Image (tube, grey):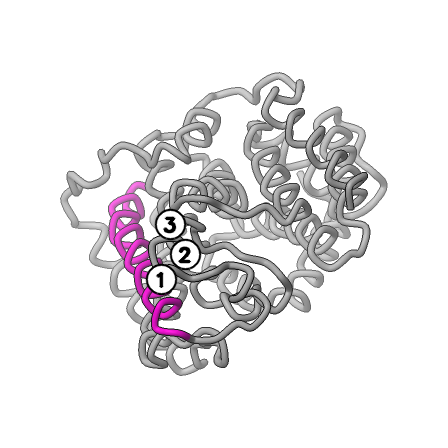
Amino acid sequence: MIAPQDLEHCREAIRHGSLSFYTASRLLPASVRDPALALYAFCRLADDEVDLGDAKVAAVTDLKDRLDLAYQGTPRNAPADRAFAAIVEEFEMPRALPEALLEGLAWDAMERRYDTLSDVRSYSARVAAAVGAMMCVLMRVRDRDALARACDLGVAMQLTNIARDVGEDARENRLYLPRDWFVEAGVSEAEFLANPTASPEIRAMTKRLLREAQALYHRSEAGVPELPIKARTGIYAARHIYAAIGPKVARAGYDNITRRAVTTKATKLGLLGVAMARTAVSVAMPKSAVVYAKPLPEVAFLVDAAAAIAAPAHDWSDTLYATFATLKTHEKVG
C-alpha cells in the first residue's frame, strides 16, 4: 500500500515533530499504525504550513492543490503526499474529511474568531474531530454511532487545547474562547488581547470550557468498545492523557496566561496502565446506551461522510469554495 521509504519518512517526521503522537501510535496494531502515521504526517504538514509560515493564505491554497492531486491519484512527488494518496485509495477515504481539516486551517489563516460555543465546536470539528473520523476509517469502522463518539473525543481534545493555550494564543493575537462569553463577563476582547491577564473572568471561562470538554470525554468512552480490540488501548490512552491536562489547569487556579499545563512522563505512564486495564475490561462490557447519543450538530456532516462506503465526488463543496473566496479577500485586505 504505502511505499516503505515513504512510510519511513512519515515515521521520522512524526517522531521528531510530534513525539506524543509517535509514542501513542506504537500502541496501535501495525494495520492501523502505519496508515495513521501517513495520515498524521500529511495533517501535520498541513498544520505547519499554515501555522508556521508567513504566507498563510498561499499555504492553504497550496494545500488545496496537494489534496486535489492526491485524490486524482497523481500526488505531488513528496513522501507525505504519496503516502496520503495511498491511504485515500486503500481505505476509500471520504474527501469531505480532509476537506474539513483544510477548511479549519483556512479559518486559522483568516484569524477567524468565534461568537458562540457552537462556533468553537464547529472549528473543533474541522481541525480535530475530522482527524478522529479519519482514524475510524483507517480502522475500517464506518458505524455511525462509533463515528459520533470519535468526533466527541476530537472536539473534547480541541477544547482542552484551547483552554490550555489561552495565554499563548492571546500573545499571538489569536482568540478561540467564545466572544459572547466576553460580553456576558463584561470583558473587552481588545483589552484582553492587548494585555492578557489571568483575571477571575478569564479563569471562569477556562473552567467553563473544560467542563464542556469533560462531558464530551465521558460521552466518547462509549464508542471505544466499538473499535477493534487491538486499537482500543491507544484510543483510551489518548483520551486519558489529553483529559489529564484539565486537572493540571485547575490545580493552577485556571491560570492559563502565565502558565502552560503539561503532564509528566510518570503521569502518562500511569494513564497508559489505566488504558490497558480499560481495554481488558471492555471485552466483557455490555454496550452502553450512551453510544447511541446523537452526534453534536457541528460534527454531523463528518459522521455522514465517514459512514459512506465510497468516497464522495471530487468536487469542492459550496461551503469550502466560499471559505476560499473569503480567504482571498482577507489576503487582499491584509
Tag 3: residue type? Leu
Q: Nearer the viewer, mark 2 or mark 1?
A: 2
Asked whether disc 2 touches disc 1, contact meaning CB atoms under 8 Å apart, the reply is yes
Q: Judge left or right: residue 313 versus residue 49.
A: left
**Label 2: element kind:** helix
Query: At 60% from the left edge and 28% from the top edge, which residue is drawn?
Result: 95
Residue holding disc 3 = 153
* Picture quadrant of residue 116: top left
Q: Position of residue 61 (x, y in %)?
A: 77, 37
**Earlier along the polypeptide chain: callout 2 or callout 1?**
2
The residue depicted at 64 percent of the width and 65 percent of the height is 172
Sequence-wise first label, 1 or 3: 3
Please tell me which of labels 3 and 2 falls first in the chain: 3
Amino acid type, mark 1? Met
User: For this view, does 15 lie left or right of residue 127?
Assistant: right
> What residue does disc 1 label?
205
* Image quadrant in which the N terminus is located: top right
Front-most of residues 196 and 143: 196
How many residues crowd mark 1 within 10 Å: few (<14), some (14–19), many (20+)? some
Residue 322 rendering spot, x and y as whole percentages: 65, 26
Report crowding for label 2: few under 14, some 14 to 19, many 20 or more residues within 10 A (C-alpha).
some
Q: Which residues are magenta?
A: 199-227
